[in-house]
Image (cartoon, rainbow, N blue to C red):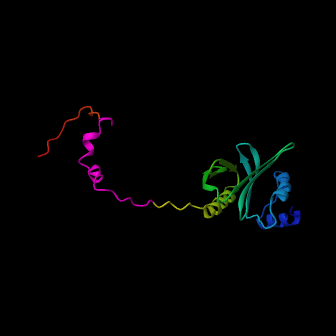
Amino acid sequence: MIDSESISTQLKNLNLRFRLFGRSEIKELRQVLRPEEKILHCVYGFYQGGSGILVATQQRVLLIDKRPFFVNVEDITFETLRHAELTLKSLQASLHIHDGVKKLIFRSLSDARLKDMKEYLATKIVIPAKQQISSVLLSDNAKPYLNPAWRPRHTVLLPRPRPHKYYTPTVIN
């Protein structure tokens, strides 16, 4: 558990003050953060399940929603993060975060903070390396089947193109 002074100094460095909304989430953040993590971006807003804060650290993205009888904490590591997209609207921006399984849509009135968070997440997204397809050596018996002249005769199961209405064929000499 991290002391409240370190979290408050990190939030002051980001020019954040939660006076009315988000105070209970910040208290819960003390128990969720690891000692080596620092808060890099933090935004208060709304998502599909309610309202809470979205926090980006060096290692992961946290969504914390604290209510009187339960706490909802979503933890998305950068290894599972696949896509981050920002949609700007008048007075409300939305950040779409996709990992391998879930899609999180987070809306906030703070367009600039969401834009900064999206740019940070875009730098942290790990793109998996494409698998190399090894070339296959074909035998001499298989090569005639790759000949394009062979294919048109065996397209019986494919749908045939319909003639266009008012179609006049042109003669090619």
In-image side of 102 versus 166 (left or right): right
Q: Is residue 110 above or below residue 37?
A: above
Is residue 65 covered in magenta?
A: no
Q: Quadrant of residue 8?
A: bottom right
Residue 59: where, in percent of width, then height?
71, 63
Residues shaded magenta = 133-160
Residue at screen point 63% across, 56% down: 81
In-image side of 63 versus 101 (left or right): right
Residue at screen point 86% across, 63% down: 2
Furthest residue toward left:
173
Residue 75: where, in percent of width, then height?
73, 54
Residue 34: where, in percent of width, then height?
80, 63
Residue at screen point 29% across, 39% down: 155
Residue at screen point 43% across, 61% down: 134
Is residue 145 covered in magenta?
A: yes
138, 163: nearer the viewer:
138
In-image side of 36 versus 137 (left or right): right
63, 134: nearer the viewer:
134
Q: Is residue 135 above or below residue 108?
A: below
Residue 70: where, in percent of width, then height?
84, 44
Furthest residue toward top:
165
Q: Is residue 96 above or below residue 166?
A: below
Q: Main secondary structure of the magenta part?
A: loop
Look at the image and tell me in which quarter the N terminus lies.
Answer: bottom right
Disc tally is: 0
